[in-house]
Amino acid sequence: MNNEAIDIILAEDEPALGMIVKESLETRGFKVRLCNDGAKAYKAFEESQPHALVLDVMMPELDGFSLAKKIRLENEQIPIIFLTAKSQTEDVLEGFDVGGNDYLKKPFSMEELIVRIKNLLNRQEVQKTAAIYAIGDYSFNFPKQRLTYKDDEEVKLTHRESHLLYHLLQKKNKVLDRSFVLKKLWGNDDFFSGRSMDVFVTRLRKKLAKDDRIEIINVRGYGYKLMVP
């Protein structure tokens, strides 16, 4: 997808920053609709069909996390990137829990924002063509981000959980390199991102716990291994 085809809703309540990001994206060919609060951004989302949303977290009327929750009730697939000065692990995890796909800490470079937008759109295209995978007694629907146990109980996965499980599955019964997946899904392999990844691995273990033949093993110093029958 070239830049001219990418339609973005940008929600940012700092007027100067909002205009800088908007104009920078537009000079690179993006179409950008700037909203200065979450309520206006939600209305813009309902009125249009953007390819992605870039949301500030701290906004009046409706904060970025609450806005993402509302959007996810209507659209599970559209990429959402949070822009925020908040950087605690619990804040990042909350962002992913409410449906965010990526998290960019202020200050940031426009080049990095553009790369992240395009990466998410590319992953979305992969999702559309991906198959449904068998993992022991579970069925993993990657496009819909669902785990189903014995064609019965369905468990919803977050975007990040779904992609992490996908990469583990591609290397099933082999070690998935920790640095590779951190750079692929988190954008870097620093300590902060590593802590976040460990939390998501723990969550996946719980969601796969009904089939005791399935294990996600921590291979210290290297990464993780998804053991499946």
Image (cartoon, rainbow, N blue to C red):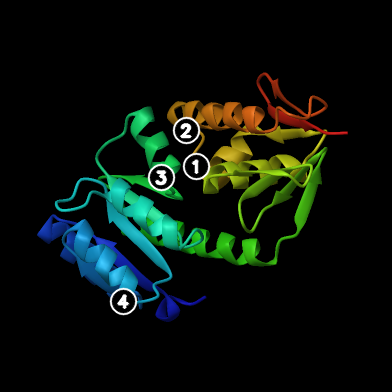
User: Of the residues under marks 1 and 4, which one precedes in the sequence?
Assistant: 4
Q: In the displayed orientation, state which residue is furthest to the bottom.
A: 4
Q: Is residue 6 above or below residue 70?
A: below
Q: Name the residue under label 4.
A: 47
Q: Do the residues labelled 1 and 4 touch (CB within 8 Å)?
A: no
Q: How far apart are marks 3 and 1 (CA)?
A: 17 Å
Q: How far apart are marks 4 and 3 (CA)?
A: 22 Å
Amino acid type of disc 3?
Val
Dot 1 alpha-carbon crowd within 10 angstroms: few under 14, some 14 to 19, many 20 or more: many
User: Of the residues under marks 3 and 2, which one precedes in the sequence?
Assistant: 3
Q: What element carries label 4?
A: helix
Q: In this view, does 47 lie to the left or right of 140?
A: left
User: Of the residues under marks 4 and 3, which one precedes in the sequence?
Assistant: 4
Identify the disc placed on residue 186: 1
Q: Mark 2 points at which residue?
A: 193
Dot 4 alpha-carbon crowd within 10 angstroms: few under 14, some 14 to 19, many 20 or more: few
